[in-house]
Amino acid sequence: MSSGHHLLYRPGDSVVHRLPAQVKIVCALLGVLCVVATPRTEFLAFAGYLVLLAVIWAIAAVPFGHIARRAVIEVPFVVIALVMPFLGGGDRITVLGMSLSEQGTLAGWNILAKGTLGVLVSLTLAATTTPGELVVGLQRLRAPAVITTIATLMLRYLEVIAAEARRMRTARVSRGHDPRFLWQVGATARGIGTLFVRSYERGERVHLAMVSRGWTGRMPDYGAPATLRTWLTGLTPVLVTGAVLAAAVWLP
Amino acid sequence: MVVSASTAMHMSDGLINAPVSVIFAGVAVAGLAAALVGARRDLDDRTAPMAGLVAAFVFATQMLNFPILPGVSGHLLGGALAAILVGPWVGALCVGIVLAVQALVFADGGLTALGANVTNMALIGVAAGFGTAMLLRPLAARGRTGLMIVCFVAAFVNTVVASAGFILQFALGGDAAFSLGAVAGSVLGLHCLIGIGEGVITALTVGAVAAARPDLVHLLRGRSAPLELRDAPVATPKESTA
C-alpha cells in the first residue's frame, strides 16, 4: 500500500507520530466529545482547546500552514454559521450597526467553534497517522475483520480508481478529445459505468494478488500492544480537555 | 419573520447537541452490528473486492460536495448503489466505513455527529434504497432499461428518506432558534435535486456493471437467464494441399 505519500499525512518522528494509532483514535474521539459538551458561552474554554491543539502541533512539528490549508474543507459549514445571525429569531442585538438575532449569533458561533475544533482534531490525527496505521489501530481496538477488510480494500482501491480514471482520460485525449472544465465533467459522467467495471476488473486482480501473498483480511501488525504508560501519555490531551471543561462548567 | 436555515446533509460537530449525538451513536452501532451479522454470509472471495470497490467509489463520489444555495452543500450518498451491487448488509457496512474514514482522516463530518450521519446515510438510506429496489425487482429482472429505471427510483428514494432522518435529528437536538418547517422544507427540496443526480449516476453505474458482469449485481442474484444453447453448423477442417 503506497500510503507513505498521503495527501494529509505529514511524515515525522515526534512523540505524537510514534504513539500507537489506537491511542490516538480514542484520544481524538474523547477530545471532540468534550468539545461538543462544552456550553457555547464558555468562550475561554474554546480558546483553551485551541491552545492545547497548538501545543500538540508544536510537539508533532506540524506547521500551522499544513493544517490551515486543509481546513478549507470546512468552508461550507462556516457559511451556514455566518448566515445564522441574520436568520434566527428571538431578541435582537446590534453589532457594528447591524441588527442581529441573539439566538442566531450564538447558534452560528456554536457551530463555527465546535465544527472548527472538530476539523482541527481530525486533521491533527490524519497528519500524524497514515491510513494504513489507522486500519491497524481499528484492528487493535477489536474492530471486526469484515470491517477492516472492507476498509483496507477501500483505501487500496481509491488509488486503483484514480489511476484508472487517469488512463481513461489519456485515452480520450489521445483520440482527439479536448477537455475543458465543464465538458470534461460530461465525458467523465458518461464514462462512469465503464470506469467502475474497469476498476473492478483491475481490483479483482489486485485482490487475488493480495490473497495469493497471504493476505487474510487483516493488516499485518508488527507492533506490541500499548502499555498503560503509553495510554496515559496519549490521553494527556483528553485529561487537559476534560480539566478545561470542568473548570469552565464549575468555576464561576 | 420568515426563517429559512439550510444545513448541509453531512453534519459537523456542534450542529446536534451531545445527548442526541450519543443516542444516535448507539442506534448506529446497533444497526451496524446487525449488518455485520448479515454480512458474514454475503462476503466471500468474489464479493470482498466488490465491497471494497463500492466503498471506494462511494468515498470518491461523496468528495464531490456541491454548494446549491448559500450555506447548503449537498453530496451524493451512494446507499442505493451499494445496496443494489453488494446487498443491504454489506452495503450498509460500506457506507458506514466510508463515513467513519471520512470523519477520522478527512475531517469531513464531525466525529461526534458520526452516529447521526451513519444512521441517516448507512442505515436509513440503504434500507430505503434496497426496499424500493426489492419492491420493483420484477421490473429490474425484465431487462437493462428496467434495471436502470429501478436504480434511478431507488437512489432517489434513498436520498430523500435519508435527508428526512436528518430532519428528525434536528427536531430532537438541533437549535431551537430555527423553525423546523423551514429547515425541513429546504433540506427536502434540496435533496430532491441531489436525488436526481444520484439516480442518474446509480443507473449509469449499475447499468454498465449489469452489461459486463451481471453475476456481480446482488439485486439480480438468482434471476439470471439460463444458459442458451444454440445449434450451429459444425466446421469441418479442409484437406491441406500443401
Image (cartoon, helix red, strand yellow):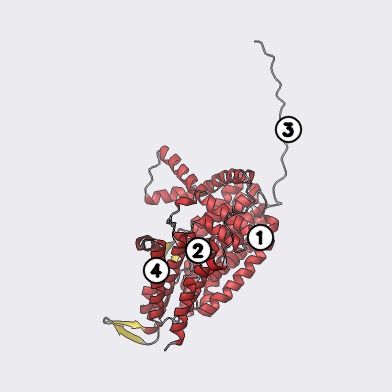
Q: Nearer the viewer, mark 4 or mark 1?
A: 4
Asked whether the beta carbons under mark 2 and mark 3 sit within 8 Å of each other, the answer is no
In the image, B77: left or right of A67? right
* Residue topped by disc 2: B104
Measure the alpha-carbon separation of dots 1 and 2. Answer: 33 Å
Residue A154: x and y in percent read 55, 54
- The disc numbered 3 marks a residue on which chain? B
Residue B37: x and y in percent read 69, 62
Q: Nearer the viewer, mark 2 or mark 3?
A: 2
Q: Nearer the viewer, mark 3 or mark 4?
A: 4
Name which residue type carries label 3.
Answer: Asp
Which numbered disc, 2 or 3, marks the residue that appears first in the sequence? Answer: 2
Between residues B173 and B155, which one lies in front from this camera angle? B173
Name which residue type carries label 4.
Answer: Val
Name which residue type carries label 2.
Answer: Leu
- The disc numbered 4 marks a residue on which chain? A
Question: Which element type, helix, strand or loop, lies under badge 1?
Answer: helix
